[in-house]
Image (spheres, helix red, strand yellow):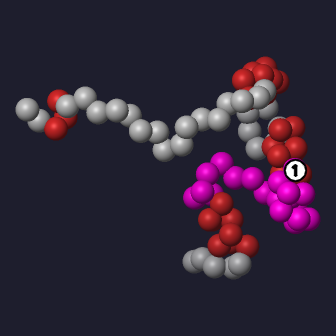
Amino acid sequence: MKIDDVKRPRIPVAAPALVGNEKRYVLECIESSWISTHGQYVARFEQAFSELVGAPYAVSCANGTAALHLCLSAFGIGP
């Protein structure tokens, strides 16, 4: 028997925490055609996050790679 033939439980990286209005918000974004970085929810998130951490501004990113790229660019690090 090969290891690939053995049934293993799937272990998620992080269990989703869908406890509020997430489904409604996603549907609103799809219906409004704002599935990008300029929708109302992005601005609201950035505002709430900046207040949470006590910063004048916050910029959200699609992923960690984009966030690191922005940090490096902000500090003038790069080619």
Above or below residue 3? Residue 60 is below
Residue drawn at point x = 38 percent, y = 34 percent = 10
Q: Could you tell whether 2 is left or right of 50 in the image?
A: left
Q: Could you tell whether 33 is left or right of 70 in the image?
A: right
Q: Relative to the observer, which residue lies in front, 78 or 41?
A: 41
**Residue type of the residue flagged with mark 1:** Ala
The magenta stretch spans residue 53: yes
Residue 44 picture location, percent across and down: 88, 44
Q: Which residue is mark 1?
A: 48
Residue 22 picture location, percent across and down: 74, 29
Residue drawn at point x = 11 percent, y = 35 percent = 2
Residue drawn at point x = 82 percent, y = 59 percent = 58
Split into 4 quadrants, where in the image is the C terminus?
bottom right
Which class describes the residues within 10 Å of circle 1: few (<14), some (14-19), or many (20+)?
some
Secondary structure beneath label 1: helix
Q: Could you tell whether 3 is left or right of 11 in the image?
A: left
Residue 28 picture location, percent across and down: 80, 23
The magenta stretch spans residue 42: no
Above or below residue 48? Residue 2 is above
Q: Could you tell whether 9 is left or right of 16 in the image?
A: left
Asked if one can make out residue 30 in the rendered structure from this viewpoint, the answer is no
Q: Which residues are magenta?
A: 48-66
Residue drawn at point x = 48 percent, y = 44 percent = 13
Which residue is situated farthest in the left direction here? 1
> Hey, which quadrant is residue 64 in on the image?
bottom right
Q: Relative to the observer, which residue lies in front, 55 or 32?
A: 55
Residue 74 picture location, percent across and down: 73, 73
